[in-house]
Image (cartoon, helix red, strand yellow):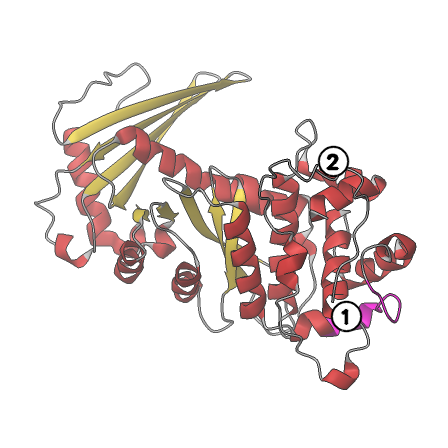
């Protein structure tokens, strides 16, 4: 199938050197295997995927919205899609997204992201799980999607659905396997603080920062005692100096509407005393974050502890820790508020995972396409009103 083109009036001169540009995501869609029997392929798979994506980019959430968008924009869609039998019904959208191999669709997504995000050196890649609260049948457990978020580039890198009879620990290795992580810093919360996961990250030629909590009670207590001895808890006015050598320090201060938040980061390579060091592949440092919040003269202090393969450097460690929070604030929040992921009721076979991938395609397109004065939600409104901007998002 050849996509039709519109608006080629700005052709370059023959003798002018052209800059290479990433392929449109639609080109990657064309490499996806069609799961349907040939005699039932009334509608082109690429047409179905593109209409679904356009619907999401303009505020649609489910299969019925895809049908409504397609029928409303039929004449426009015909300018670059074939649509041999018109617009598919919402049942057809449901059947196709339920049948698509989610791993193959994810591979298309990952390869596309590599094309638009080639610079990954020192990128902080935050991995975290998110519930799909309404995408379940009666008697089933709430499904989870584990996602990878590139903090510097502001892009979703990939996602894997957690098996109904498992948890995030089993999905994280699957996600690590498909990602290109060389030179990156991978961050995980306490659920992902596992020896096997540390080994896999190092095997991908990446570094890690793993949060410690009660699931490793002994290790958590040992690291806590180490930092309590080295850095006694203090108030806002405490001394920030550290003894040079195996300990480094970094601090940030944020003030907003009467609230002061100070984050103090300590990073130490003094770990030879740690008996379990050989069990954690690549381990070479411990980290601690002390968050001090003052709201209306009331102070609260919280300390968190980490295992890391990073060399000494509190500022880099702090950047990784702060970057991990972005997976909640910039990925999960955007998926729920902008694309209604938490409201999605798609639950048949592979539908939930495939729609989750499509939402991440839509989010990346919104993030990467210039419209700096608009929020993500406003860009969706703009795409619904301005067909040229929607074409710009699609890259065609």
Report the number of numbered marks. Answer: 2
- Circles 1 and 2: CB atoms closer than 8 Å: no
Left or right placement of residue 76 versus residue 322 in this view? right
Residue 361, placed above or below residue 245: below
| Residue 245 belongs to the span the image colors magenta | no
Report the residue marked by disc 2: 378
| Residue 83 belongs to the span the image colors magenta | yes
Image location of residue 201, percent across then percent down: 31, 55
Residue at left offset 20%, top offset 53%: 218
Q: In which quadrant of the rendered view does residue 81 lie?
A: bottom right
Image location of residue 121, percent across then percent down: 37, 41
Classify mark 2: residues with Cα within 10 Å, few (<14), some (14-19) or many (20+).
some
Q: CA distance from mark 1 to mark 2?
A: 31 Å
1 or 2: mark nearer the eye: 1
Q: Residue furthest left?
A: 273
Report the residue marked by disc 1: 44
């Amino acid at each position: 199938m050849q996509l039709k083109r519109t608006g080629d009036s700005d052709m370059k001169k023959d003798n002018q050197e052209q800059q290479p540009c990433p392929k449109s995501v639609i080109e990657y869609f064309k490499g996806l295997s069609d799961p349907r029997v040939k005699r039932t392929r009334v509608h082109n798979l690429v047409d179905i995927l593109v209409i679904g994506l356009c619907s999401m980019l303009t505020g649609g959430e489910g299969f019925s919205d895809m049908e409504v968008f397609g029928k409303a924009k039929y004449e426009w869609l015909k300018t670059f899609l074939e649509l041999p039998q018109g617009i598919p019904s919402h049942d057809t959208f449901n059947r196709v997204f339920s049948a698509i191999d989610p791993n193959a669709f994810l591979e298309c997504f990952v390869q596309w992201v590599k094309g638009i995000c080639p610079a990954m050196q020192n990128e902080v890649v935050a991995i975290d799980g998110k519930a799909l609260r309404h995408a379940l049948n009666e008697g089933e457990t709430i499904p989870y999607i584990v996602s990878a978020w590139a903090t510097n580039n502001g892009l979703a890198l990939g996602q894997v659905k957690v098996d109904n009879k498992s948890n995030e620990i089993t999905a994280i290795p699957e996600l690590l396997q498909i990602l290109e992580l060389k030179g990156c810093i991978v961050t995980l919360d306490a659920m992902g603080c596992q020896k096997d996961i540390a080994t896999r990250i190092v095997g991908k030629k990446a570094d890690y920062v793993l949060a410690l909590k009660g699931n490793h009670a002994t290790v958590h207590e040992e690291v806590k005692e180490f930092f309590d001895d080295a850095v006694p808890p203090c108030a806002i006015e405490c001394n920030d100096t550290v003894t040079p050598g195996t300990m480094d320090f970094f601090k940030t201060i944020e003030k907003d509407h009467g609230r002061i938040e100070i984050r103090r980061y300590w990073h130490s390579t003094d770990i030879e005393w740690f008996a379990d060091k050989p069990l954690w592949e690549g381990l070479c440092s411990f980290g601690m974050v002390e968050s001090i919040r003052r709201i209306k003269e009331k102070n609260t202090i919280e300390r968190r502890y980490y295992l890391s393969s990073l060399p000494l450097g509190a500022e880099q460690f702090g950047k990784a820790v702060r970057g991990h929070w972005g997976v909640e604030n910039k990925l999960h929040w955007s998926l729920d508020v902008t694309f209604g992921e938490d409201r999605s009721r798609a639950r048949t076979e592979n539908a939930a995972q495939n729609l989750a991938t499509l939402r991440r395609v839509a989010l990346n397109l919104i993030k990467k396409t210039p419209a700096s004065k608009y929020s993500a939600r406003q860009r969706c409104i703009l795409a619904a009103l301005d067909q040229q901007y929607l074409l710009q998002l699609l890259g065609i």
